[in-house]
Image: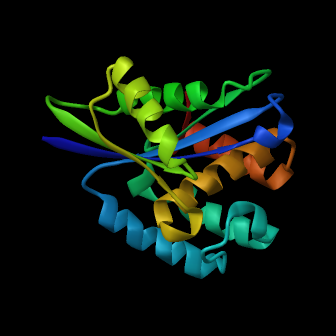
Amino acid sequence: MQKLYAYVDESGQDTEGKLFLVSVVVLEEERERVRLALRDAERHSRKGLKKWTNSRQKERDLYMQRIVTNPDLLGRMYYAHYKHSRSYIELTIMTIAKAVFDRDIKGAYQTTVLVDGLKHAERPIFGSGLRKLGIAVRKVRGVRDQSDEFIRLADAIAGFVRDALEGNEKMSKMYKGALKRGVLKEL
């Protein structure tokens, strides 16, 4: 049975619906190899365990340069951005489903979904919503940024895309290159 792991974060609730971003990283058997690469990128950039918003620009630049050039992440990082909506849970569920369906799934599979800051009471909503969309869900749980490299990556992708869309020149250039090479995919 194919096992998928979807790591999810968002950005933009502070804009009250003007801009909402969801980032999803979908991994399979390469997880441990990617975990080591993420630790190396966090160490090299000196970003460490910090959230995107708490890291300095130089740390962000160095971290994302490592991320967008990592061949193991090619086609595994997704995002969707929405405007003029406060349907955060529904949009997040829909984005997760799109990311999972974009993977090359052969036969039976199960998906473990890990969402930054997901409240215990919201887990059944996510599980049910994903199943209604046809996703084979094994487990849904909430995690914190500081506890997992993959959630920190999803946080960084959301922040990176938001910075690029809001006009940060350096991030915009790196973002366009990542899209062009297929490292990052808009849903």
Q: Quadrant of residue 130?
A: top left
Question: At 17% across and 30% down in the image, what residue appears?
Answer: 106
Question: At 67% across and 24% down in the image, what residue appears?
Answer: 87
Left or right, 75 with respect to 181, comes to: left
Question: At 75% across and 22% down in the image, what residue appears?
Answer: 85
Percent x, y of residue 109: 20, 35
Question: At 63% across and 61% down in the image, what residue appears?
Answer: 64
Where 167 falls versus 152 (above or below)?
A: above
Percent x, y of residue 69: 53, 58
Model colouring = rainbow
Quadrant (top left/top right/bottom left/bottom right) for the N terminus: top left
Residue farthest front in this picture:
121
- Return the residue nearer the eye: 104 or 97: 97
Quadrant (top left/top right/bottom left/bottom right) for the C terminus: top right
Where 70 falls versus 98 (above or below)?
A: below
Where 121 falls versus 63 (above or below)?
A: above
